[in-house]
Amino acid sequence: MNILLTGGAGYIGSHTTVVLSQAGHNVVILDNFCNSQKSVLDRLQSILGKALPYVEADVLDAAAVEKALRDYQIEAVIHFAGLKAVGESVENPLKYYANNVQGSISVLQAMKAVGIKTFVFSSSATVYGDPQYLPYDEKHPTKPMNPYGWTKLQVEEILHDVSISDPQWKVACLRYFNPVGAHESGLIGENPSGIPNNLMPFVARVATGHLPKLNVFGNDYDTKDGTGERDYIHVMDLAEGHMAALTYLENHPGWHAINLGTGIPVSVLDLVGAFEKVIGREIPKAFAARRTGDLPVYYAQPERAKALLNWAAKRSLDEIAASTWKWQQTTVKTER
Ligand code: NAD
Ligand code: WQD
């Protein structure tokens, strides 16, 4: 199948590119490189043994998106392109609504103009907000706690309305939990610019000495060791979940919201411990105050993905830590 990956040069998009290409799909990347580097295209070529077609464009440019859809005879779109920093979305909500909501509308309008009706959307567990119960299943109420989460929920609602207006549309809203890890080659992974907000890349930078120590935000939560618990899913498992979703959509039109998580809550100290085991030494750390806006615990009920997509996360915490470290050692240190 000819598939356009908007934001395909990014962390999750690049890994999904590998999985889809190696399964025989023809992948085209459309990206404006606002949060990725073109060097990822060369590294994808090293992994895949072939150059990938790409279009440098902003998804807000519907004409450019439409041209890409026509030029490459695209049959389905996976829409990764989006801004994802929760804190920044609080400071600059208009930037997030413009990029994430208007950008999605722009892609959908281009698809409508060309007659393409298969769409996989990068949604987020952030749509659920304060847990009424755990684990989150797809029936959990959705009430985001920040503008970023609202952009994701609003696009889900838009997609629901589109699928009601035309039952031929095939839509999967994949609600990711906490993607971590890297491809086994160490050639692609997560390399946020500036000081990382997220735990895993921050720990990796402490391990390489680029950052002095890890501040553990809170050790007085009602959890097994007092630190926050999350559902960390290996990015390759996540990528495979996208391929499973595309296969499912082939015979299942309509709108489908599906959690992509492991269903296993893991604490900050658990994750750091797995990383320390890989590198063979302690990560300098100190307990600090809770981070504003943090939830104590959240994790997925992954049964629907298993039932519908015949997909489940299978990679371990040790594989997450080992792949992150290999990425850090192989590529990140040379990218600075
Ligand atoms: P990322 O920033 O690594 O990748 C996003 C890519 O989209 C980047 O290459 C960026 O240059 C591109 N992009 C952004 N705005 C664009 C625009 N207007 N036009 C064209 N390209 C644009 O992020 P990621 O971690 O790979 O996340 C991919 C998607 O998954 C995002 O929509 C994000 O909200 C969502 N998501 C991420 C996480 C996570 O923790 N990483 C969790 C849940 C959902
Ligand atoms: C994980 C745990 C922190 C950094 C975010 C977004 C969410 C989604 C995934 C897009 C928490 C603790 C962290 C640090 C720490 N992204 N921590 N010290 O906040 O669960 O989710 O990324 O959709 O929308 O909110 O991820 O990695 O920031 O935090 O102790 O320096 O690590 O308190 O318990 P989070 P995170």
Image: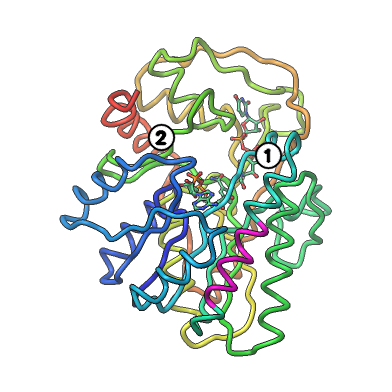
Q: Main secondary structure of the magenta part?
A: helix
Q: What is the spatial separation of the Cα atoms under label 1 and label 2, in whole angstroms?
A: 24 Å
Q: Position of residue 315 (x, y in %)?
A: 41, 50
Q: Amino acid at mark 1?
A: Val
Q: In percent of the image, x 43 and y 44: which residue is there?
A: 33
First in sequence: mark 1 vs mark 2: 1
Q: Is residue 319 visible?
A: no
Please give left or right for residue 192 compared with residue 299 in the image. Answer: left
Q: Which residue is mark 1?
A: 86
- Ligand 2 within 8 Å, label 1 CB: yes
Q: Position of residue 64 (x, y in %)?
A: 46, 64
Q: In the rendered structure, which segment of residues is drawn in magenta?
A: 101-111
Q: Looking at the image, which is closer to me, 281 or 79?
A: 79
Q: In percent of the image, x 31 and y 23: which residue is there?
A: 333
Q: Position of residue 249 (x, y in %)?
A: 50, 80
Residue 2 quadrant: bottom left
Q: Amino acid at mark 2?
A: Ala
Q: Quadrant of the N terminus?
A: bottom left
In the rendered view, tell whether residue 47 sits above or below residue 215: below
Q: Looking at the image, which is closer to me, 70 or 253?
A: 70
In the rendered view, tell whether residue 295 sits above or below residue 45: above
Residue 61: within the magenta?
no
Residue 105: within the magenta?
yes
Q: Secondary structure at mark 1?
A: helix
Q: Which residue is mark 2?
A: 321
